[in-house]
Amino acid sequence: MRWYSGTDDGLDDDSLLFALELMRHDRRERIVFFDRAEPFEPAEWLAWCKGENKIFTMVFRNDGTPVAAVWFTDGTRTGRQVFSHFCGFGTAGFAELVRAGKSLLGKIAENTSIRQFIGVTPACYRHALKLAYSLGYERLVCLRGAVQVHGKERDAILTVCGPEEQREPDLRKNQLG
């Protein structure tokens, strides 16, 4: 895993542009950025990846093959919660994306103050929801008409992922014994 940090040990511009190229090659840019009217121009993409209040990461195999881009945005004031977004590349299958995603979430939690990852996923994106659930995200609620997907109002699923000990108890179960 590497992230954009503005230093020599992080992602450089070529890596960031390669992520965009991979999204476009697999026709995923429009899917991932469903709320944008136009595709990114390269300079705009670089500025977006490097923007404040964002952790932009890429996950790689040991041989250097990129398998996914993942970014975290809109952190809370405490730094404990962030919104999470992802795009798997066509270079990895589902099982590999799950392993990589779990590893990434663990590394982020280990190396930052982030403890909960929040997702707002269009309900029509069943493939993305399947991956989110496989990573440990739990469905909280359906948000009616919450997102615009290619100009159409769509429902979204609100999910959260965090360490087991921080999850709320299931209030539907009798907690008294």
Image (cartoon, helix red, strand yellow):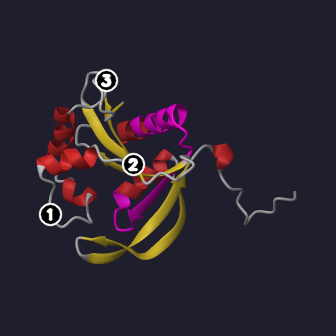
Front one among 2 and 106: 2
> Which residue is labeled 1 in the image?
38
Say the numbered circle drawn on residue 86.
none
Secondary structure of the residue carrying tag 3 is loop
Vertical placement of 93 versus 141: above or below? above
What is the three-letter code of the residue carrying label 3?
Asp
Identify the residue shown where x is 25% and y is 25%: 64
Percent position (x, y) of residue 153?
Answer: 32, 78
Gap between marks 1 and 3 measured at Cα:
31 Å
Vertical placement of 96 versus 177: above or below? above
Task: Please report whichever mark, 1 or 3, sits nearer to the chain's N-terminal start.
Answer: 3
**Span colored in magenta:** 100-127
What is the three-letter code of the residue carrying label 2?
Asn
> Which residue is labeled 3 in the image?
9
What is the three-letter code of the residue carrying label 1?
Glu
Identify the residue shown where x is 31% and y is 22%: 62
Task: Please report whichever mark, 2 or 1, sits nearer to the chain's N-terminal start.
Answer: 1
Front one among 103 and 78: 78
> Which residue is labeled 2 in the image?
53
From the viewer's perspective, tell me whether residue 138 is left or right of residue 130.
right
From the viewer's perspective, tell me whether residue 174 is left or right of residue 22.
right
Q: Mark 2: give few (<14), some (14-19) or many (20+) Cα within 10 Å.
A: few
Q: Quadrant of the N terminus?
A: top left
Image-quadrant location for residue 10: top left
Q: Mark 3: give few (<14), some (14-19) or many (20+) Cα within 10 Å.
A: few
Q: Quadrant of the C terminus?
A: bottom right
Q: Mark 1: give few (<14), some (14-19) or many (20+) Cα within 10 Å.
A: few
From the viewer's perspective, tell me whether residue 68 is left or right of residue 26.
right
Q: Is residue 7 magenta?
A: no
> Contact (CB < 8 A) between labels 2 and 1?
no
Percent position (x, y) of residue 85?
Answer: 37, 51
